[in-house]
């Protein structure tokens, strides 16, 4: 979920093994590893969070997404099945 909208839906094993939405990827990269000898780079999400009260048209993650294009800001991006039982709301996966 991102700002009240489902952006990725699949089995939990598939989600952790193959996250496809850029927000899911950033969230999973932020999971800490409890090992002081293991250094991990996180995807830091930059940009501005849009208002959840009056969101603009298009993908709600677009102002923070490094892959955003003009198409992402034009209209809502519905969940689409990109592989069996793996649904993602992202134009870059079409
Ligand atoms: S639809 Fe566009 S802005 Fe939204 S996550 Fe996908 S690439 Fe990024």
Image: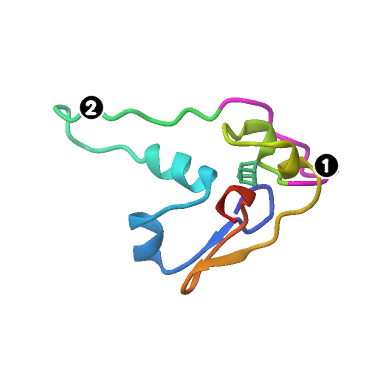
Q: Residues within 10 Å of mark 2 (few under 14, many from 20)?
A: few
Q: Chief secondary structure of the magenta span?
A: loop
For image coordinates 58% across by 36% down, the residue present is 67
| Relative side of 10 to 37, left or right | right
Q: Residues within 10 Å of mark 1 (few under 14, many from 20)?
A: some
Look at discs 2 and 1 and give the one toward the viewer: 1
Asked if residue 14 lies in the magenta stretch, the reply is: no
Q: Is residue 7 above or below residue 83?
A: above
Q: Residues at badges 2 and 1 in contact (C-beta under 8 Å)?
A: no
Dividing the image into four equal quarters, which quarter contains ligand 1?
top right
For image coordinates 78% across by 38% down, the residue present is 51
Q: Is residue 86 above or below residue 33?
A: below
Q: Residue furthest front?
A: 94
For image coordinates 28% across by 30% down, the residue present is 40
| Lower sequence index among marks 2 and 1 | 2
Q: Quadrant of the N terminus?
A: bottom right
* Residue 48 figure quarter: top right
Q: Nearer the viewer, residue 33 or 28?
A: 28
Q: Determine whether the residue tagged by mark 1 lies in a helix, strand or loop.
A: loop
For image coordinates 83% across by 41% down, the residue present is 56
In magenta, the rendered stretch is 46-58
| Relative side of 43 to 68, left or right | left
User: Horizontal and vertical percent for residue 62?
Assistant: 68, 38
Q: Residue furthest right?
A: 54
* Residue 64 figure quarter: top right
Q: Which mark is residue 39?
A: 2
User: Horizontal and vertical percent for residue 42?
Assistant: 38, 30
């Amino acid at each position: 979920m991102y700002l009240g909208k489902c952006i990725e839906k699949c089995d939990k094993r598939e989600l952790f093994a193959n996250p496809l939405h850029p927000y899911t990827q950033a969230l999973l990269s932020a999971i800490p590893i409890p090992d002081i000898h293991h250094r991990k780079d996180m995807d830091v999400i930059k940009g501005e969070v849009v208002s959840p009260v009056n969101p603009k048209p298009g993908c709600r993650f677009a102002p923070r997404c490094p892959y955003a294009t003009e198409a992402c800001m034009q209209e809502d991006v519905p969940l689409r099945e990109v592989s069996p039982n793996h649904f993602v709301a992202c134009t870059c996966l079409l």
